[in-house]
Image: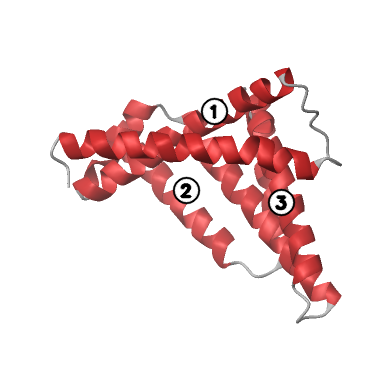
Amino acid sequence: MKRSYLIFQIFILFGLSAYVLYNRNVFTAAVMSLLLAALSLINKNHIVYYRRLKYIFGVSIFVVLFQVVFNRTVPMDIRLANGLLTSFKLFSISFLVLWFTSNISFSQLVESLNFLKPDLRLLIIMSLSLIPLIFKELEMIQTIQKSRAVKFNFFSVHKIIPALLVPLLHRIFQQAQNLSLAIISRGYE
């Protein structure tokens, strides 16, 4: 019974994600984002949501600005609509994944994915297990940079990107290389 409920949750997650990704209406995407944000307020761990989503908020603002400034082949209203649609999709997918991962334990997730092929199951489990590590690395790098007197505010984007993203990408690629070597040494190829 519990396993079938977990599989049902996974299919709901995939179904809602597919709906969000294939939606082309800005209003529907905004309503979906607001409904998912309201749903996250009901959860007891809503502070965890907003602590993780503050990074996604910055990325979504960057996406909107990028669409408005660099996509000059279409009129301004369509550029703004495309940027907002992409940022609402990003928020919705992030809320869905955070909601799913906060309501299910890792062992339950592994157990519920037994219907998939082993290679695909390993890929999904490894991807989901690395997401919290990326956030921990980002917080650690941010603490290190603050100790070096780097000030993080909205107007110093030119300082934030090299100070956070370059060390974060370096550590992520280093961990991915270590993980791939560990997998190869255990005979998974």
Q: Is residue 37 visible?
A: no
How many discs appear?
3
Compared to residue 46, the image places residue 35 above or below, namely: below
Label 1 and label 2: CA atoms lie apart by 26 Å
Q: Is residue 37 above or below residue 44?
A: below
Q: In this image, 132 relative to 176: left or right?
A: right
- The residue that mark 1 highlights is 137
In the rendered image, the vertical position of residue 96 relative to residue 135, given as above or below: below
Residue 125 shows up from this direction:
yes
Identified at 40% across, 41% down, the residue is 127
Mark sitting earlier along the chain (3/1): 3
Dot 1 or dot 2, earlier in sequence: 2
Among the 4 quarters of the image, the one containing residue 65:
bottom right
- State left or right for residue 153 relative to residue 115: right
Residue at 70% in and 62% down: 85
Q: Earlier in the sequence, mark 3 or mark 2?
A: 2
Left of 172 or right of it: where is 95? right
Q: Nearer the viewer, mark 3 or mark 1?
A: 1
Relative image position of residue 35 (x, y in whole percent): 69, 46
At label 3, the amino acid type is Ser
Q: Residues within 10 Å of mark 3 (few under 14, many from 20)?
A: many
Q: Position of residue 58 (x, y in %)?
A: 73, 44
Q: Closer to the camera, 107 or 54?
A: 54
Q: Which mark is residue 96?
A: none
Q: Amino acid at mark 2?
A: Leu
